[in-house]
Image: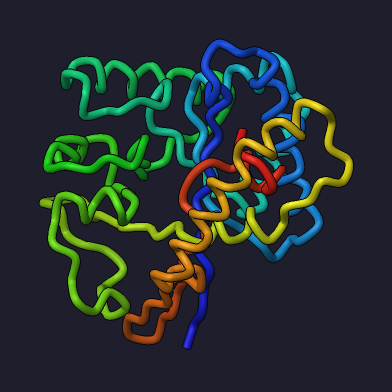
Amino acid sequence: MNKFALGIHTVNVAYTAGNLNSYHRQIREGIVPLLNILLRHPSWCFNLQISGYSIEFIANNYPGVLEIIKILINKEQIELISCTFSPQIWIAYPKYDLIKSIKLNREILESYGLKPSRIFFSHENFSGEGLSMLKEWFDVAIVKDDYYYYLYDKPDNLSSLPPYFNLNEMKLMVGWGHILEGMADKLYSKKNLNAHEEILLRKNKQFLKQGYQNQKNEGKLNGLICNYKDIEWKWYHVGSSERFGKAHMRP
């Protein structure tokens, strides 16, 4: 039996849109520690989703970080996913806008010597039948379970599902990312926090505790172990990577 822990970490420097201090902080305190983990553990690898906008920001402000990303890509520790120029609720825009974003992103990737992936990460994790129109650029689309099963009935036995579904000529993967809140709660600490972080900690602690309890009650904290033929896997995270740099608080 081959066993895997699956994670897709997304980089969106505009998580707090317009706040440049937040942009820089996410790179220094979120992305760099995450990359350092891979450098220290050469047998570990995961998917890293970065929009063209974020790649440009990293290249212009932290060229050394972009070089580390390239090194990890060449070592096959990172599979780069980069599908659009900026993270967006893609189903809220006309087809023209989405395709324009894809083409612009590919120009940016080429300018920095990065190869475009055939994987589409559904920004904001929304899904829909319109995904199949992207077959010219992508072979696989990835969505998150809670958004996907908002639209479609959830099967009774999730652990027996195949690793992907057929979506016309594309494949659709459903990722599970329910372990994060439990990690954040367990890693809570008031040590080495500045005054601003103390305020955020007090404001968010009850929210995170409630989320942790809800997920514990629903049996999601241990993650869903799936089996298919001779493969066993568990999704540990699908979403923002900066939360792993400072897991005790939301950005």
Q: The C terminus appears in which quarter of the rendering?
A: top right
Question: Which residue is pictured at 48% across the width and 45% down the height?
Answer: 239
User: In the rendered view, would you say 95 is above or below 183?
Assistant: above
Quadrant hosting residue 197: top right
Question: Which residue is pictured at 11% across the width and 51% down the height?
Answer: 168
Question: Which residue is pictured at 19% across the width and 77% down the height?
Answer: 156
Q: How is the image coloured?
A: rainbow
Which of 234/81 is in front? Answer: 234
Quadrant hosting residue 60: top right
Which of 27/83 is in front? Answer: 27
Which of 151/171 is in front? Answer: 151
Question: Which residue is pictured at 41% across the width and 80% down the height?
Answer: 231
Query: Is 87 left, or right, of 136 in this rendering?
Result: right
Residue located farthest toward the right when viewing the structure as drawn: 192
User: In the rendered view, would you say 203 is above or below 140?
Assistant: above
Quadrant hosting residue 56: top right
User: In the rendered view, would you say 13 is above or below 135?
Assistant: above
Query: Is 115 left, or right, of 247 in this rendering?
Result: left
Query: Is 155 left, or right, of 40 in this rendering?
Result: left
* Residue 66 seen from this side: no
x, y percentage for residue 88? 35, 25
* Residue 188 seen from this side: yes
x, y percentage for residue 67? 72, 32
Q: In the rendered picture of this protein, how many numbered marks are placed on residues?
A: 0
Which of 236/146 is in front? Answer: 146
x, y percentage for residue 206? 58, 47
